[in-house]
Image: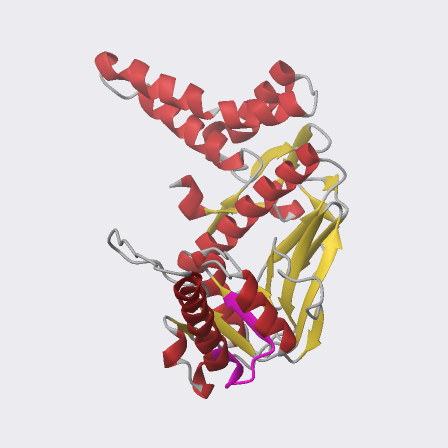
Amino acid sequence: YAKVEKINGGDIEDCRVLKGVMMNKDIIHPKMRRKIVKPRILLLDCTLEYKKGESQTDIELSDEKGWEALLLQEEEAIKEMCDDIIAVHPDVVVTEKGVSDLAQHYLQKANISVLRRVRKTDNNRIARASGATIVHRTTEIADKDIGLGCGLFECSKIGDEFYTWFVDCESPKACSIVLRGASRDVLNEIERNLGDAMNVVRTIYQDPRLVPGGGATEMAIAQKLVENSKRQDPKIANAYRSAGTALEVIPRTLLENCGADIIRQITMLRAKHAGGANITWGIDGEKGVLADMAALGIWEPVAVKM
C-alpha cells in the first residue's frame, strides 16, 4: 500500500491503496471460513431462495401430506441451485440478492463462504479485481466464470463493523482506498482532500499544462485587466476593474487563512505584479508572506483555472 503522511498540511492516521476491493459486509454463517488464500470466487446476481410465483396463486391441500410435498418441492429447488454452485467448487460466493437458511446450510456443508445483498457496483468491482464473470442463473455457471485473480479473501472486524477484503490481486482493474482518521470530521476532511487530489491528477493527464499557484495567476490576470481598463471606453472600464478586483479574492483568502496582514501583503503583491513583472509571485500559504511559486514548486493545472 501507499501511505500518505500529510494531506493539506494536516497529519492523518493512515491512507492505504489496496490491490483489490474492500466492502462493509460479513459472511452469513458463523461456521463459514473467514480467511482463504487464493480463493475461487463466484459472482451471482440471482437469488438463492425459492422463487414465488409472479402472479397470485391459490393452492388447496386436502391433507398434511400435500403440505409436506409442497415444502419438499421448495427444498429440492434450493438444493438444485446449491448443487449447481458446488459443482464448480468455488471457495467464495457473492450474490446481489438474498440467500435462504437452507441454502446457507448446504453451502456451509460444502465449505463455501457466502456474502449476500452486495451492491451492484461492489459486485462489478469484485469482478474487475478478481477476473470473475457475474452469472445470472445458477444453471449457467461454468468454470470460466470463476475468478482466480484474487490472492486473499478475509473477513475482519474494524471497530464495531465487519469488513470483507478481496486483496493481493494479480492485475486488479479496480482498487479501494482505505482512509483512517481520529474522528468522523477528520475522516470527512481527508476524503474531500483526497478527492480533490485525484481530480487534479486526472486533470493533469487530460491537459498536462501548469500555472503558478498561491494566487499568482489570479493576481497577474487581475493586473492585466486593471491596466487594460484604462484603455477602454468608460462604459466598460468599470467592468474590467471589477473583474480584476474579484480575482484578487484568491490571494486575499490565502492571507486570511494564515492570519497575515491582508492589506499590507496584497499591496506588496500588487506592486510585485505591476507592469507584468514577477508573474510567478504569490502567497506562501504556510508563512503568510510573498514568495516565488516557481522556486517553491507550487503549480496548479491550467484546466482547473479554465
- Specify the quadrant that holds the N terminus: bottom right
Q: How many numbered marks appear?
A: 0
Residue at point 32%, 21% (across, down): 240
Q: Nearer the viewer, residue 192 or 286?
A: 192
User: Which quadrant of the figure contains the C terminus?
Assistant: top left
Q: Coloured how?
A: secondary structure
**In this orientation, which residue lies closer to the viewer: 40 or 57?**
57
Residue 95 visible in this rendered orientation of the protein:
yes
Q: What residue is at 44 percent from the left and 77 percent from the top?
A: 80
Task: Point out residue 6 in the picture as x, y percentages from the top left corner.
Answer: 72, 46
The residue nearer to you, when weighing 170 against 211, is 170
Residue 29 lies in what quarter of the image?
A: bottom right
Residue 89 painted magenta: yes
Residue 1 visible to the viewer = no
Extreme residue toward the front, this view: 63
Does residue 264 appear left or right of residue 227 in this picture? right
List x then y, in percent, for residue 280: 55, 40
In magenta stretch: residue 4: no
Relative depth, front residue between 56 and 300: 56
| Residue at the (64%, 57%) spot, across then down | 26
| Residue 83 point in image, percent of width and height | 49, 80
Q: Quadrant of residue 247?
A: top left
Q: Is residue 240 left or right of residue 259?
A: left
User: Above or below — where is 280 with respect to 136?
Assistant: above
On the picture, is 59 further left or further right than 48? left
Residue 22 found in image quarter: bottom right
At a point 41% along the width and 47% down the height, the residue shown is 303
Magenta span of residues: 85-94
> Residue 31: where, in percent of width, then height?
71, 67
